[in-house]
Amino acid sequence: MEMMTVSHTTIPSRPQIPEGRDREAAPVSAGRISEPEAVVLFDGVCNLCNASVLFVIDRDPTGYFRFAPLQSREAQRRLDQLGCGAAGDLSSIVLLEGGRCYRRSSAALRIARRLRGLWPLLYGFSVVPAPVRDLVYAWIARNRYRWFGQAAECRIPSPELRSRFLAPDPVAEPQ
């Protein structure tokens, strides 16, 4: 496996993969994300989040999901355009799908239902009320840096993975 190092941060290279309403979703009136793709916004300095992105890429053979770190200008632009919350909130993964924004456990479950293997079975947990699911999500999110660590800056995808990422800029300028 080839490795790529950028600013003291290394991510493995993966083979390039072709691109190809739930009650917790925030409705969106303008700037819809068109199918057949969804966008996953994640904390780009969180090691757990970065590992999760690679996990999804490996189990998404159709290239349905595209990615951008929440710290990027592209994530900020999309969140602003869709009116679905503050871009500075790094405590939750965000899924932009079908013109809607999903956060926390709803985003994670909706991502799982599109993955190859048995992962779609996890979507069955969507019957559990969101506040209960989100308590578990918040506990993990609160402890993710302590348990898994964090990088000094957002990782740059390898050339093989670059087409799966929307953000050409690794990190947005401080505001």
Image: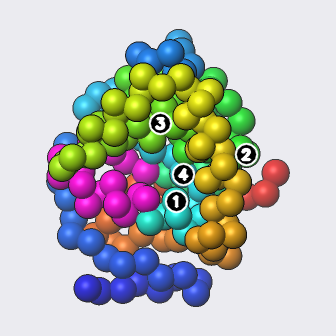
User: Reading the chain from its start, which is encountered first: label 1 or label 3?
Assistant: 1
Helix, strand or loop at disc 1?
Answer: helix
Rounded to the nearest angstrom, the CA distance separating label 3 from label 2 is 18 Å
Q: Check disc 4 and report the residue beneath it.
A: 42
Circles 4 and 1, Cβ within 8 Å, touching? The answer is: yes
Horizontal side of residue 173 vs 101, given as left or right: right
Residue 76 visible = no
Residue 50 lies in the magenta-colored region? no
What kind of colouring is applied to the model shown? rainbow
Q: Which mark is residue 161?
A: none
Name the one closer to the observer, 168 or 150. Answer: 150
Residue 46 in the image, given as x and y percentages of width and height: 60, 64
- Label 3 amino acid? Ala
User: Reading the chain from its start, which is encountered first: label 3 or label 2?
Assistant: 2
Q: Looking at the image, which residue sits at the far right? A: 175
Q: Which mark is residue 49?
A: 1
